[in-house]
Each structure stands twice: as C-alpha cells, then as structure tokens.
Image (spheres, rainbow, N blue to C red):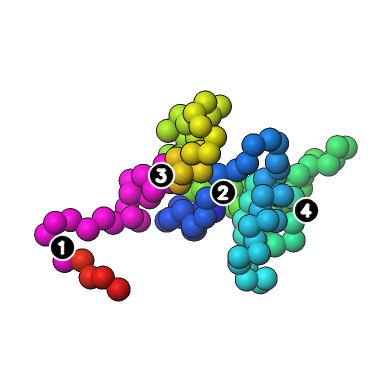
Amino acid sequence: MVLPQGADIVDCTAGAPGPKSDINLFREQKKGFANKQKFSGDKAYIGEPSIQTPQKKSKNQELTPEQKQKNKELSSERIFVEHVIRLVKIFRVAQERFRLNTHKYEQIILTICGLVRLRIGTLILPTKNQETKLV
C-alpha cells in the first residue's frame, strides 16, 4: 500500500507460499484500517466495496466515453503506485522466483521496501552530526 502521489510505502505484504489473489490478501490486511477508509486499486480488486476500481468493458459492449474518462483519471492517480512497484522490482529478488531460504523472504522484502523508502526520501536516517533523542 502506497500513499497518494507515491509519497511513502504504508504497508507491504510479503506473501506466502502458494497462489493467493490480491483481493484475498487485501481482505486479510484491511482489518487494521478503519471501516470507512477508501482505497484505489486496479482490476484485480473489482468486487471489493472499499476499493475504487476502473470499469471493465463487458463481453458484448464497449465502455462509454464517460467511463473511459473516469478510467483515465483513476489511472493517472494510480501511476505513482506503479512507479513505486517498479522501484521495488528493480531488486530482482522481488520479481523472480525466490531461491533462498523461504523463512527469510519476508525480511528481505521488507529490507527492499526500506531501501526504496530511503531512495524516495521518506526514510531519513540520522547522521553522526545530528543528535538522536531516545524516547
């Protein structure tokens, strides 16, 4: 999950062995969010009431110009999410079959997300010159 404009990575689900659809992963994770929270997603999330998704054309009909325009507006908002996904997939371990110890997969994916956050400037590490306060 990414904030609007791709400002930060909010949540990362590393997944589990075996096939599992995006919408089922979302349904498991949404318990941590408020019931009125609204999300934006791609066509994999059609059918979930809390996620705004693009219109799909039906088998025998084309989309109306209004539906096409609404899909364009939604995709222009979502492009930032796709850019963050691309940044994560630059690390090939996130896009190819994982061949290392499967128990370390989540730790590695979360490390990659931390590196991406550092790259986009949302994770700021203290330097030696900065004073760090313990809470």
In the rendered structure, are the residues bearing label 4 and label 1 in contact, judged by CB atoms less than 8 Å apart?
A: no
Q: Which residues are magenta?
A: 112-131
Residue 28 picture quarter: bottom right
The answer to whether residue 123 is magenta is yes
Q: Amino acid at mark 1?
A: Gln
Image point (74%, 56%), residue name: 48
Give the structural element (helix, strand or loop) at label 4: loop
Amino acid marked by disc 4:
Gly
Marked residue nearer the N-terminal end (4 or 2): 2
Mark 1, Cα crowd under 10 Å, few <14 / some 14-19 / many 20+, is few
Crowd rating for badge 2 (residues with CA inside 10 Å; few <14, some 14–19, many 20+) = few
Q: Is residue 46 visible?
A: yes
* Nearest to N terminus: mark 1 or mark 3: 3
The residue labelled by disc 2 is 13
Label 4 Cα crowd, 10 Å radius (few <14 / some 14-19 / many 20+): few
Local SS, label 1: loop
> Residue at label 4?
47
Q: CA distance from mark 1 to mark 3?
A: 24 Å
Q: Can residue 71 be seen in the rendering of this structure?
A: no
Residue 133: name its quadrant: bottom left
Mark 3 residue crowding within 10 angstroms, few (<14) / some (14–19) / many (20+): few
Q: Amino acid at mark 2?
A: Thr
Residue 130 circle label: 1
List the residue tagged with mark 3.
Answer: 111
Residue 66 image point, x, y percent = 71, 53
Give 72 or 48, whichever is nearer the viewer: 48
